[in-house]
């Protein structure tokens, strides 16, 4: 029975993850699915809140829509989370490209990274270098169509 319990938990986790991604991907007017992965945080709760803060940021969503590798918007969204962290300790990756490390921006090709940000699925990874906890969150980009649909919607 224990074997089935573990299997059932894994199957449910996979189904719920797929549903969460589908909901995020199907946002009105969305063109991109954004996955934010936070790793090596002190607590799982902290990792999840940091990831949610980034994926929920209108400025991050707009940057992703515009293929702008703006690490400053990601760092700012982490700060809005309310979770204490040391920006001199973290790394930020956009599509596996290191854009910010230990308090300073890195040397990367903006043009090459902008090309990668044209994909339908974008990954932002933040390494907190502060523990072993992980968290993920999914969302979509903020497009002209999204604003139009929601501006014209009346209750």
Image (spheres, grey):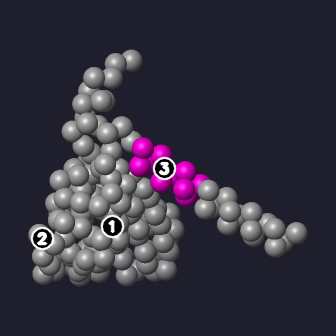
Q: Where are the magenta residues, as a range?
A: 16-26
Q: Quadrant of residue 34?
A: bottom left
Of the numbered discs 3 and 1, the one sitting upstream in the chain is: 3
The Cα–Cα distance between marks 2 and 1, rounded to whole angstroms, is: 15 Å
Given residues 111 and 43, the one toward you in this image is 111
Q: Is residue 49 visible?
A: no
In percent of width and height, residue 27 lies at 39, 42
Q: Is residue 17 magenta?
A: yes
Q: Is residue 44 magenta?
A: no
Of the numbered discs 2 and 1, the one sitting upstream in the chain is: 2
The Cα–Cα distance between marks 3 and 1, rounded to whole angstroms, is: 18 Å
**Where is mark 1, residue-wise?**
124
Q: Quadrant of residue 92?
A: bottom left
- Direction from residue 106 to residue 149 in the image, left or right: right
Q: Secondary structure at mark 3?
A: helix
Answer above or below: position of 17 versus 144: below
């Amino acid at each position: 029975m224990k074997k089935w319990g573990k299997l059932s938990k894994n199957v449910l986790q996979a189904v719920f993850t797929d549903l969460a991604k589908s909901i995020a991907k199907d946002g009105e007017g969305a063109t991109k699915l954004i996955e934010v992965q936070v790793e090596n945080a002190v607590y799982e709760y902290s990792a999840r809140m940091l990831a949610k803060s980034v994926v929920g940021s209108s400025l991050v969503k707009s940057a992703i829509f515009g293929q702008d590798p703006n690490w400053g918007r990601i760092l700012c969204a982490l700060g809005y989370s309310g979770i204490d962290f040391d920006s001199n300790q973290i790394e930020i990756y956009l599509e596996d490209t290191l854009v910010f490390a230990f308090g300073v921006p890195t040397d990367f090709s903006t043009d090459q990274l902008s090309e990668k940000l044209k994909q339908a699925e974008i990954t932002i990874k933040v390494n907190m270098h502060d523990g072993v906890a992980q968290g993920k969150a999914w969302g979509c980009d903020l497009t002209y169509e999204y604003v139009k649909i929601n501006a014209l919607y009346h209750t």
